[in-house]
Amino acid sequence: NAGVTQTPKFRVLKTGQSMTLLCAQDMNHEYMYWYRQDPGMGLRLIHYSVGEGTTAKGEVPDGYNVSRLKKQNFLLGLESAAPSQTSVYFCASSFGGPISTDTQYFGPGTRLTVL
Amino acid sequence: GENVEQHPSTLSVQEGDSAVIKCTYSDSASNYFPWYKQELGKRPQLIIDIRSNVGEKKDQRIAVTLNKTAKHFSLHITETQPEDSAVYFCAASNGNTNAGKSTFGDGTTLTVKP
């Protein structure tokens, strides 16, 4: 049981480049989330998903897109990276559904630098 | 939407002393309040949580209290140890209507001096 995993762990991009961050969970969780963490600003929700094939915007969605084609995977895309997107990105998942406990399990994070 | 404020932003204590971190929330419908610990370079991990039908919960050296009327909740760590040094985040959510989304505080950096 690997829990929540993220790929890649580190990445450096040039302004304007695109990339996709992959999150995978093997706990059969319904809900998945993408956060960014910047110094002194805590965790801010980018996008989230309440089930396969559904996504919704969070607090800071601009410049990002997501897809949840499979229940276990949640992809975060940056179409045209900007220096302001330099951050640590965390994926999380939770059980969801009618017996939701709301406890979120986090992945190890992806450190992204945009030059 | 929900707004969570966390204080203090930094806290330094001597080993063996107690540490208290406080959070306030704005949405009276919030019913779940977890606390996460994040060590340097690591992922946030749940350390304790409390639901709105409970006023206090304790797990060994850590405890959380909730005051629904005042809309604030606190994390208490007793007999602090150097390994308690980390960033602590509080969060609030409404599991019934909010897709499990949590609103996080900005974090408290706790330093325990040996």
Image (cartoon, coloured by chain):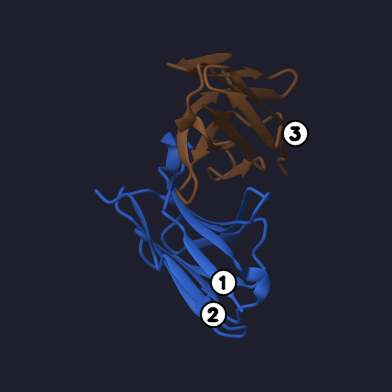
Chain colours: A blue, B brown
Question: Quick one: label 1, few (<14), some, or many (20+) residues within 10 Å?
Answer: some
Q: Secondary structure at mark 3?
A: loop
Task: Please name whichever residue, A30 or B41, is drawn nearer the observer in this view of the structure.
Answer: B41
* Residue furthest left as drawn: A1
Q: Secondary structure at mark 2?
A: strand
In this figure, which residue is indicated by the disc labeled 2? A13
Classify B67 as above or below A104: above
Task: Please name whichever residue, B18 or A24, is drawn nearer the observer in this view of the structure.
Answer: B18
Q: Is residue A38 left or right of residue B43?
A: right
- Picture coordinates of residue A42, whole percent (x, y): 63, 48
Alpha carbon of mark 1 to alpha carbon of mark 3: how far? 34 Å
Asked whether the residues under marks 2 and 3 belong to the same chain, the reply is no
Alpha carbon of mark 1 to alpha carbon of mark 2: how far? 6 Å
Q: Is residue B5 left or right of residue A26?
A: right
Say which chain tag 1 marks. A
Instruction: Find out whether the residues at labels 1 and 2 contact each other: C-beta distance under 8 Å.
Output: yes
Amino acid tagged 3: Ser
Of the two numbered discs 2 and 3 in the rendering, the one whose residue sits closer to the viewer:
2
Q: Is residue A110 left or right of residue A62?
A: left
Q: Which mark is residue A113?
A: 1
In this figure, which residue is indicated by the disc labeled 3? B26
- Picture coordinates of residue A69, whole percent (x, y): 39, 68
Classify A95 as above or below A22: above
Question: What residue is drawn where x is 73% and y is 44%?
Answer: B1
- Picture coordinates of residue B25, whole percent (x, y): 71, 32
| Residue B1 visible at all | yes
Alpha carbon of mark 2 to alpha carbon of mark 3: how far? 38 Å
